[in-house]
Image (cartoon, rainbow, N blue to C red):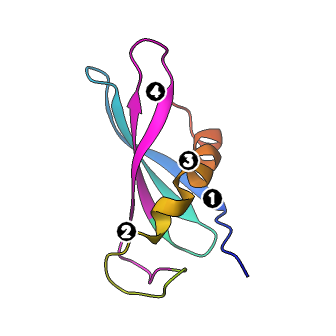
Amino acid sequence: MAYQPQVVDAKLVSNNPKNGLFELVVTLKDRTSCRLIYETDAASGAKNATHINRLQNEPCPICRKDFLCNCMSKFKDEISTQAMAKVETP
């Protein structure tokens, strides 16, 4: 069965309007927390997710490792679109 992330909650943690960077902390249905880092394109105003990090409160739901892994980067775009729908963007 393929992993399908579902965003339950998203919160704006930090915002830097000078350089267009901001961070969201996202909670998924399986209790995994992730930090998404975005940049805002100056010309078009588009917001692009650049990095995703899994916070270390639960093991990875994909590989079940309890340390740093890059599994969530495969689902960055899917998690990003769900998170942006739940939070008011700066």
76 above or below 12?
A: below
Other residues around mark 1 within 10 Å, as few (<14) / some (14–19) / many (≥20): many
Looking at the image, is mark 2 or mark 3 nearer the viewer?
A: 3
| Residue that mark 2 sits on | 55
Q: What amino acid type should be assigned to the residue bearing mark 1?
A: Val
Amino acid type, callout 3? Ser
* Residue 71 image offset from top left, x and y in percent: 46, 71
Q: Identify which residue, 8 or 20, lies in the foreground.
A: 20
Query: Is residue 51 a member of the stretch shown in magenta?
Result: yes
User: Magenta part of the protein: which range?
Assistant: 34-60
In the displayed structure, 90 sits above or below 13; it is above
Q: Earlier in the sequence, mark 4 or mark 2?
A: 2
Q: Nearer the viewer, residue 17 or 4?
A: 4
Residue at (70% x, 76% y) in the render: 2
Q: What's the amino acid at mark 4?
A: Pro
Q: Please, what secondary structure does the residue beneath circle 1 have? A: strand
